[in-house]
Amino acid sequence: MSTKNLSAADFEQTIADNDIVLVDFWADWCGPCLMFAPVYEAASEKHPDLVFGKVDTEAERELSAAARIMSIPTLMVFREGILVFAQPGALPASALEELIVAVKAADMEAIRVEVAEQETVESSS
């Protein structure tokens, strides 16, 4: 499966409707973004069971702001609607593959407990 361009109109629905979604925030003037693009595209071909989305930060300024994108490229990974990874910088192919394997193997019950605990702490402060 190739990458899918995401916009504010379909971003949340894409994350809600799919088990694992990777999102690359990029811009066409960004050198590291352009270097990461073929790595990301190759991973999308290797993992057709995952959704690989791209958000053009220039075209989707409000979405990028809502996602708190400060540096590009930034890669976010969602599993079962939960943000499990967010990091700026272009990843080499081997690191992206390791990340995908780790996300697939993640204990989502433990992650849900951790998120619930974090929300409890944030709401009490």
Image (cartoon, rainbow, N blue to C red):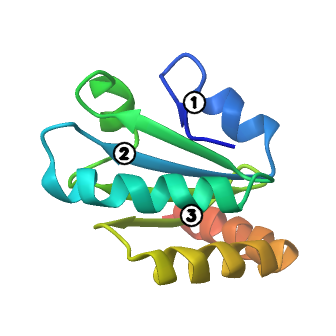
Q: Distance between the residues labelled 3 and 2?
A: 32 Å
Mark 2 sits on what residue?
Answer: 25
At 21% from the left and 55% from the top, the residue drawn is: 71
Secondary structure, mark 1, is helix
Front residue of this view, candidates 121 and 85: 85
Mark 3 sits on what residue?
Answer: 124
Q: Distance between the residues labelled 1 and 3?
A: 30 Å
State which quarter of the image contains the N terminus.
Answer: top right
At 56% from the left and 40% from the top, the residue drawn is: 3
Mark 1 sits on what residue?
Answer: 11
Mark 3 neighbour class, 10 Å CA radius: few under 14, some 14 to 19, many 20 or more = few
Q: Residue type at mark 3: give it.
A: Ser
Q: Position of 63 compared to 27: left or right?
A: right
User: Image quadrant of residue 4?
Assistant: top right
Mark with earlier residue (3, 2): 2
Mark with earlier residue (1, 2): 1
Q: Position of 20 compared to 30: left or right?
A: right
Q: Nearer the viewer, mark 1 or mark 2?
A: 2
Q: Residue 108 carries which label?
A: none
Residue 20's spot in the image, x, y percent?
A: 73, 55
Secondary structure, mark 2, is strand
